[in-house]
Image (tube, helix red, strand yellow):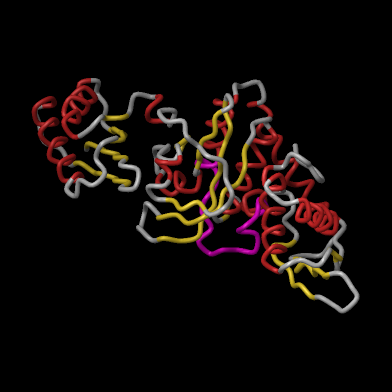
């Protein structure tokens, strides 16, 4: 459980010696609710970077998410945090967050892999995306107090929850292509470490895709996979391990369109009315969604010997399909 300065915090370790000194000074100032924080003179873009890294490393720092900077002759650089609420609320909010995390105590005896699934599924079942961008949408407070937040708040909560369970995790920032509407926007997600290997985990995108069925399109992806619809901008560790994503581990990956017929046939023979799968060799095929629908329709007629209305959800970036036969 994080609290106070940790010398092994990921983004802190990416800074220069000079930047690390500023990091520790600013963090201490934020925790003390200081109106002014004196730091050594440094370029404004470097101070901005340090401030961002503090908020990424420390999900419990939610009282300020911006600052103003001024320099005076003969004086150090002065940072003035823009606090979002009175100081007397900070301790109350921190206690609420820590008390909320106890909901994950039942997962403490699980393996790290199962802890990840537990936190992922809890978020999908209990939280919503804050389209109104409320007061605490960018922090863990949005979820703890109201059950809703934007990607930054969700990623920070996942970081905090997995950290609480002893699983190494960090927040990554960049851009994402929304699988629901295709728009590109600033985005935040996580990188998790399991058995010494690192993977991308985007709970926000999975939340947006999930309805009655939970989705795992962005569960433990490699750099190559996540970069199909994400642009990494923060100084994140490489994720080179492939084949450990949720669908691969659960035999829900089809090698290509030629293998799709047998996969759908077998699923229907097993009595499945909802099928979720990933096609690993379909990127660049413009009519892939039409092919999937044609094959699914023919399979249903041949196997079930009847006709069906087929509903399809298609995540083009990750080539994941959800078919529902009615």
Q: Please name the residue shown 16% across and 29% down the image.
A: 261
Q: Please name the residue shown 59% across and 25% down the image.
A: 112
Residue 194 or 159: which is nearer the viewer?
Answer: 194
Does 237 appear above or below 256? Answer: below
The residue range painted magenta reads 123-141
Magenta residue check for 136: yes
Q: Exactly how many numbered labels are in the figure?
A: 0
Does 45 appear above or below 325? Answer: below
Q: Is residue 90 visible?
A: no
Q: Please name the residue shown 31% across and 35% down the image.
A: 278
Q: Is residue 284 visible?
A: yes
> What x and y, as percent, mark residue 32?
87, 57
> What x and y, as percent, mark residue 43?
72, 68
Does 220 appear above or below 155? Answer: above
Magenta residue check for 89: no
Residue 306 or 23: which is nearer the viewer?
Answer: 23
Report the side of 181 relative to 66 (left or right): left
> What x and y, as percent, mark residue 193?
58, 32
């Amino acid at each position: 459980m994080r609290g106070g300065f940790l010398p092994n915090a990921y983004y802190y370790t990416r800074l220069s010696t000079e930047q690390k000194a500023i990091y520790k000074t600013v963090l201490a100032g934020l925790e003390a609710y200081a109106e002014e924080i004196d730091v050594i003179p440094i370029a404004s873009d470097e101070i901005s970077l340090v401030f961002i890294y503090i908020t990424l490393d420390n999900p419990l720092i939610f009282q300020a998410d911006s600052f103003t900077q001024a320099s005076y002759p003969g004086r150090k650089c002065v940072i003035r945090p823009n606090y979002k609420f009175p100081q007397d609320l900070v301790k109350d909010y921190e206690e609420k967050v820590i008390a909320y995390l106890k909901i994950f105590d039942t997962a403490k005896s699980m393996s790290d892999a199962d802890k990840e699934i537990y936190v992922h599924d809890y978020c999908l079942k209990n939280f919503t995306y804050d389209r109104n961008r409320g007061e605490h949408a960018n922090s863990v407070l949005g979820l703890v107090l109201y059950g809703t937040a934007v990607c930054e708040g969700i990623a920070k909560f996942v970081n905090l929850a997995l950290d609480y369970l002893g699983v190494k995790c960090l927040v990554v920032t960049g851009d994402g292509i929304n699988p629901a509407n295709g728009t590109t926007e600033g985005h935040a997600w996580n990188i998790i470490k399991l058995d010494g290997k690192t993977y991308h985990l985007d709970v926000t995108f999975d939340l947006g895709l999930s309805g009655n069925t939970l989705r795992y399109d962005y569960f433990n992806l490699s750099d190559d996979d996540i970069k199909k619809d994400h642009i990494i901008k923060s100084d994140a560790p490489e994720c080179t391990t492939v084949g450990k994503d949720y669908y691969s581990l659960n035999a829900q990956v089809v090698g290509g369109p030629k293998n799709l017929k047998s996969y759908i046939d077998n699923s229907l023979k097993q009595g499945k009315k909802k099928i979720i799968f990933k096609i690993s060799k379909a990127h660049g095929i413009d009519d892939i969604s039409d092919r999937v629908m044609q094959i699914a329709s023919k399979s249903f007629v041949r196997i079930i010997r009847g006709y069906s209305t087929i509903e399809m959800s298609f995540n083009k970036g990750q080539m994941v399909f959800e078919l529902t036969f009615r």
